[in-house]
Amino acid sequence: MYSAILIFIMVVMGVFFPDRFGKVSGDIGSWIINNFGWYYMITMTIIVFFCLFLIFSPIGKLKLGKPDDEPEFRTISWLAMLFSAGMGIGLVFYGATEPITNYLSPPNADPETKKAMMDSMRSTFFHYGIHPWAMYGIVALSLAYFQFRKNEDGLLSKTLRPLFGDKVEGPLGTVIDVLAVFATVIGVAVSLGIGTMQINGGLNYLFGIPQNFLVQAIIIMVATVLFLASAWSGLSKGIQYLSNLNMGLAGLLLLITMIVGPTALIFKVMTSATGLYLDGFIFNSLDVAPLNASKAKWLESWTIYYWGWWISWSPFVGIFIARVSKGRSIRQFIIAVLLVPTLVSIVWFSVFGVTGIEIAKKVPGIFGLTTETQLFGIFNELPFGTILSIVAMLLVSSFFITSADSATFVLGMQTSYGSLTPSAKIKVTWGILLSLIAFVLLLSSGDKGLGALQSAAIISAFPFSLVIILMMISFYKDADLERRHLGLTITPDKEKMEEYVEETRKDENYELEREATEEVY
């Protein structure tokens, strides 16, 4: 209730005072960036290394669920769902544009040089690589652990019980859950706004349909009807089918572009840029350019904005990934969530980034196209360009519907005491509010493009980042206690295992506990 009221107030302010709303959000976003950009960088880095620690820790042997729980979804469908929910629209929207933009204005090189091209690819890999997926992973891990192993409700506040005890049932828990809902709504609305802009850009480039707010509002309304229809079909049907469709369309688009583009150069640049990404991983994770004003400005516009967007999206993606990850071990979960999407992102941006830069060198007019039309301008210079543009618009639309569909489920879950089957009425309510917020953010942006969208992501991320830090501490506190209770070590302690087995013989659930011990070892 509190969350819906807060979102409704934002909608009213945005509709009746769009310019003021955009200016205030922009000012707050700029203040946070200027004063707390370093905090975002440190927070993301700590989370990355905590996830890496869990891979090698004995805690990784624990299962997200009871000892006999099995995964609900096939691995390929599981990966497709977490990837579609995680950053699908961003991949299409920024697939060619980010490398091109940073080729023209790189953080560490002279513009439009070979070094600029490598630097642009390296920074793009950084923004879509391990860092965002570590953020998603830690939120999802904590939720899945407490919900499926500890029988807690699927609310973020309940993951903090080891730190605050029964206080999570009172006002403190309410505040945490409201923050989670607020961050979810803003994060998803930013993505929907970006998706709307690109669909409008594609329609403009291909069919001459105007790029304006009216057309974008119509796109949002049509998409709203479609994703609400999908939401009625349930998680295991609608979202799973849409996610598989997304991966099929994305694979088709990627394969065709790879073949008709500069294939050899794509793989060469991908290999070298991956080396640069790994080589400067720690430095770039903490670099805030305190004595370099131009680079600091670049970091604010790209890296820190991305970190804010990923943090604001983490409750949505985290809750959704947790819901579909029951029955998997912590180690399996972390490895899959960190590596698979990162590798796919590296391949994706290599194909579209290298192809885009090489074509734009020959057709300089592409450099001047707007962000939402640049990809279609590139396709226009390739064989099968019209087909590629149509597939791209279908893919953005499908990602749009999948993200919104997933979000209605997640928001319904968060506002119905963690229910795994929120009512259709609740999902429809949140679906409409999501569309209204995306509508308001586009209205407030006006001719400033992504301004209000970026500011909204950064603002919503700031308070929620504190919750994520507490979730990480709480998870480790409880999981380490369980690890010690089970006698789990990097090298199994046979004496402790035998003692544990002997103790469980006195328990009426001996068979279940024995299976858990055998699975662990």
Image (cartoon, grey):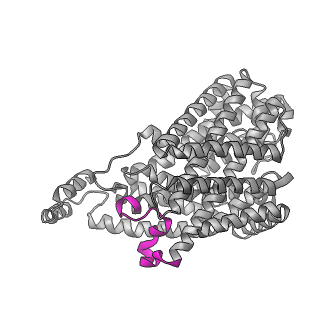
Q: Nearer the viewer, residue 221 or 333?
A: 221
What residue sits 52% from the left and 46% below the top?
82
- Would residue 185 appear left or right of 174 to someone viewing this image? right
What residue sits 30% from the left and 60% below the top?
489
Q: Nearer the viewer, residue 475 or 343?
A: 475
What residue sits 43% from the left and 73% below the top?
161
Q: Where does residue 327 sit, x and y in percent of width and height?
A: 36, 50
- Would residue 410 appear left or right of 361 to someone viewing this image? left
Task: Establish if 152 lies above or below 214.
Answer: below
Q: Where does residue 84 sit, x and y in percent of width and height?
A: 56, 43
Q: Is residue 156 magenta?
A: yes
Q: Quadrant of residue 119?
A: top right
- Would residue 354 appear left or right of 147 to someone viewing this image? right
Q: Magenta stretch?
A: 147-171
Q: Nearer the viewer, residue 313 or 407?
A: 407
Q: Is residue 443 magenta?
A: no
Q: Quadrant of residue 205?
A: top right
Task: Establish if 92 lies above or below 421.
Answer: above
Residue 317 appears in the figure: no
